[in-house]
Amino acid sequence: VSNVDITLQITNLIFLIFATAFFKESDLAKQNTTLHAWIMVCVIGLVLSYTIYSIFAWIHGSLKTTPLGKAARIAFRARDVMTHLAQMPESQFMGLASKMLESDRELLKSTTDMLVGVFLK
């Protein structure tokens, strides 16, 4: 049960209490019906505002990337880069690889070892 559902049910209860106030018919003329109406309108207005806010918060939350989504995005990007490298002509690949610094080659070696260990078990 969500907070919005509970809030709407409580609002319904408040609305019913004020709409069907337990007054004797002879006492109705003495009651301030305008005050009851304003209370009901204010409660409904607050609840509708909260409901709209909750809906937008839910939409905003659903658009955020989850940790799984972030990991998937990184994995797919890495796969796209590897596919692009696999389709690159060997002479171009070797020409670019020869320009790499030693620290980059060590990083590439450790990354390759990790990829083999994770994806090519």
Image (cartoon, rainbow, N blue to C red):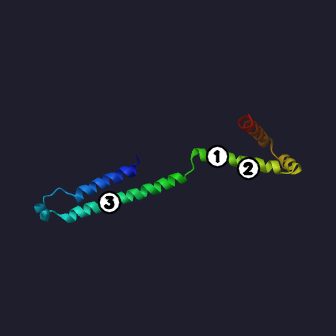
**Real-space Cα distance between discs 1 and 2?**
12 Å
Q: Secondary structure at mark 2?
A: helix
Q: How far across and down, in percent of the image, does residue 107 sit?
A: 75, 40
Residue at screen point 80% across, 49% down:
85
**Real-space Cα distance between discs 2 and 3?**
52 Å
Residue at screen point 70% across, 49% down:
77
Which residue was labeled with disc 1?
Answer: 72
Residue at screen point 35% across, 52% down:
7
Sequence order check: which comes first, mark 1 or mark 3?
3
Q: How far across and down, in percent of the image, does residue 66 sit?
A: 56, 47
Badge 3: how crowded within 10 Å, few (<14), some, or many (20+)? some
Which residue was labeled with disc 3?
Answer: 44
**Res 18 quadrant in image:** bottom left
Q: Which residue is more in the foreground, 23 or 67?
A: 23
**Res 101 quadrant in image:** top right
The amino acid at mark 2 is: Asp
**Res 46 quadrant in image:** bottom left
Q: Which residue is more in the foreground, 12 or 68?
A: 12
Q: How far across and down, in percent of the image, does residue 62 sit?
A: 52, 52
Badge 1: how crowded within 10 Å, few (<14), some, or many (20+)? few
Residue that extends furthest to the front in the rendered view of this protein? 25
The amino acid at mark 1 is: Ala
Badge 2: how crowded within 10 Å, few (<14), some, or many (20+)? few
- The disc placed on residue 80 is 2
Q: Secondary structure at mark 3?
A: helix
Q: How far across and down, in percent of the image, does residue 89 sit?
A: 86, 51
Q: Secondary structure at mark 1?
A: helix
Question: In the rendered view, does 75 fall on the left or right side of 2?
Answer: right
Sequence order check: which comes first, mark 2 or mark 3?
3
The reply to whether callout 2 and callout 3 are in contact (CB within 8 Å) is: no
